[in-house]
Amino acid sequence: MEFNKSKQELTKSNTTLQNEGGDENKKGFGLGLRHVQALLLFFCFFETFFLRINLSVGIVSMTNKNSSNPDFHVKDGSNEEKKLSYLKETHSLENSSVPQRKKYYFFEEFGWTENQKSAILSSFFWGYLVIQAPAGQLGQYFSPKLLLLGANLISAVLAGLTPTASYVGGWKLLCALRVIQGLCQGFAVPLSYKLISKWAPPNERNRYVGFSLNGGTLGATAAMPLCGLLASSSGGWPSIFYFSGLLGITWCALWAWFAADSPAKHHSISPEEKAYIENSLVHVSQDEEPKTPWSQIFTSIPFWALIFAHLGNGWAFAMIITEMPSYINSVLQFNIATNGILSALPYLAMWLLTFPVCWLADYLQKNKIVPNSVVRKLWTTIAQSGGAIMLVSMGFVGRDAVAAMTLLIITVALASFLFSGYNINHLDLSPNYAGVLMGIANGLENITTILAPLTVGWVVEDTRSVEQWRIVFIISAIVSITGNTIFVLFGSTDIQPWNTIDQKPKKNENNQSIP
């Protein structure tokens, strides 16, 4: 009798652990290796965004030497004697020696047109577009850790080769290099969601996703001023890409040593933390990955609503991340160093705001104050529609630098709500296929991230024209609000029936199926 009673109590205890809303789950386990994985993903997005954005700042210096440093001179391929002759003519020197009071640096200045620059800036997203869905599917069958390691290592090496590619092949070869970098970095988001689905307990999910992906925000924040300072240093604009490559290789070394595909595969995780994580993930397959239900995914209305949210955000994101340095330089008339610092301020505000925003989302969800769907849709609306209004307003303040920068900071800061908005909805719909869903949706998002910079090239013929930039901002707002509206009307946070389709039933020690 006592044995049966103890057995019943043990069963009840296990059931409580497996319940997402159970007391043990609410209490939490404290700091552990799952937080180390989140930190590694944080720095993954930090370095990938740094490598992605570096050219947005660098291209200003590459095409306008005066924006970087007045001591830079055009590298024309001539020998040293001709360079010294050039300095003699410029400074009325009577001897052939370089003046000791000043150093002069020779770097290439490329005469690329606005359309060519737009093509260069958008080329990254061509590669990023086509690999997203395949990357998510590859993560179902191969080690996400190793796939992410290989992709990021190639991307880092290519970053270091960017100056050479620009000198040797001009803008066309640079476009090709950026396409390959886009292919490599396209693995980051879908594979990260696959890893998060294995490592993040549901009651920590908003903060886990927010913290991990927020590394990209800090990467963008750091890239703007650092790239500007590097461009104006004695290393010139090439130093931007050498530093970026070194940053990526350093992350790869840390990832190879400390990361793991799941708690079950980590060599040093404690049994208690492993049990805490796995018992909380009742909707996630811990064994063999189920077959991907492609037809059910592509006929899912909530998933298509999520895709439209991606499309709306992608346009505004690409326009801000790739074109704002040019806007600040051309319209607001700031040099490259100041440009970098000003371009970073909005992302610093976004990075800081993300933490309380994600904590609030977890708090509301855990305490069931409002339905989870309300959090997802409200947070998305604040970010996309609120940001769109700020962006349009920026087009009407003209060359007022203070007003323009204030509105830009608010626009980007509001994007912090996306981490607990539509950006986590993939895990709501299907934890087992979160990587696949993110791969598809994020891949399609890059249709708009490609079109946005190209649209700037088509609309903005004079980069100093406030009126032409205003048209660009209005177009971005319309696309963003449309995507937001569709998500609010048709989006869902319910686990979809196809999350567990074709899963093999678990068996007990007697090889009997467990219902």
Image (tube, grey):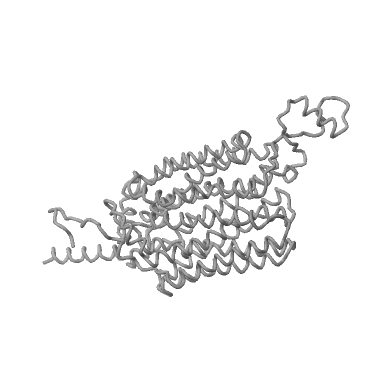
User: The N terminus is located in which quarter?
Assistant: bottom left
Residue 186: give x, y in percent of width and height.
47, 48
Q: Quadrant of residue 300?
A: bottom left
Vertical side of 128 occupied by 402: above or below: below
Q: Nearer the viewer, residue 329 or 130?
A: 130
Q: Nearer the viewer, residue 453 or 87?
A: 453
Residue at image location 38% in from the left, 53% down from the top: 194
Residue at image location 35% in from the left, 59% down from the top: 431
Q: Quadrant of residue 493?
A: bottom left
User: The C terminus is located in which quarter?
Assistant: bottom left
Q: Nearer the viewer, residue 404 or 313?
A: 313
Q: In the rendered view, does 292 fall on the left or right side of 375?
A: left
Residue 221: give x, y in percent of width and height.
60, 53
Q: Nearer the viewer, residue 195 or 368?
A: 195
Residue 87: give x, y in percent of width and height.
81, 31
Residue 404: give x, y in percent of width and height.
69, 63
- How many numbered markers are drawn? 0
Q: In the rendered view, does 501 fall on the left or right side of 139?
A: left
Vertical side of 153 occupied by 263: above or below: below
Of all residues shown, which one is farthest toward the bottom?
A: 369
Vertical side of 101 occupied by 297: above or below: below
Vertical side of 13 occupied by 135: above or below: above
Q: In the rendered view, does 433 fall on the left or right side of 78?
A: left
Of all residues shown, which one is farthest toward the left?
A: 1
